[in-house]
Amino acid sequence: QVRPVESGGGSVQAGGSLRLSCAASGFRDMRPCIGWFRQRPGSGRELVSAISSGGTIRYAKSVKGRFTISEDNDGVNYSLWLQMNRLESEDTGMYYCAAREGFCDSLLPADYTYWGHGTQVTVSS
């Protein structure tokens, strides 16, 4: 069973940076898409960024140029990071690491099978 575990959230002032980490293991015989969703107060979960096993990366428009996703894996164990720079108050929310088998061709949370419990990011203005 794949169970992502996030870390690295916290509180920061606008303009600051945070780096989120995710560790996920158990991807036997899978070539997953793994990424970050966030849930802002009063909103549903939205894709922030995702990376496929082939290296294809996608970003939400609101974070492009400010956030950078990266990953490393040995085929079974995956490490995922999200470097978040020039943070804005609108980036406040719970950030989740999630994975699905196959390509990163879906923005929908319902299409991602494996979820972590989330890590809180709070940006004060």
Image (spheres, rainbow, N blue to C red):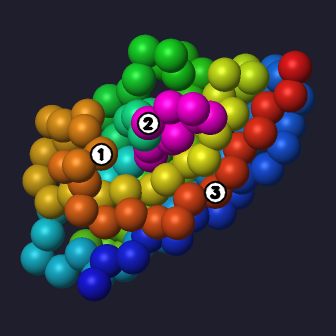
Give the residue pinned by disc 2: 44
- Check if residue 37 falls in the magenta segment: yes
Q: Amino acid at mark 3?
A: Thr
Q: Do labels 1 and 2 touch, CB within 8 Å?
A: yes
Query: Residue 5 at what x, y percent from top left?
Result: 52, 71
Mark 2–mark 3 distance (CA, rounded to whole Å): 16 Å
Among the two numbered marks 1 and 2 on one chain, the one whose residue lies closer to the N terminus: 2
Q: Amino acid at mark 1?
A: Pro
> Residue at (38%, 35%) from the top-left corner?
47
The answer to whether any part of residue 86 appears in the image is: no
Mark number displayed over residue 109: 1
Among the two numbered marks 2 and 3 on one chain, the one whose residue lies closer to the N terminus: 2
Local crowd size for mark 2, using a 10 Å CA cut-off: few (<14), some (14–19), many (≥20)? few
Give the residue pinned by disc 3: 119
Mark number displayed over residue 95: none
Q: How many marks?
A: 3
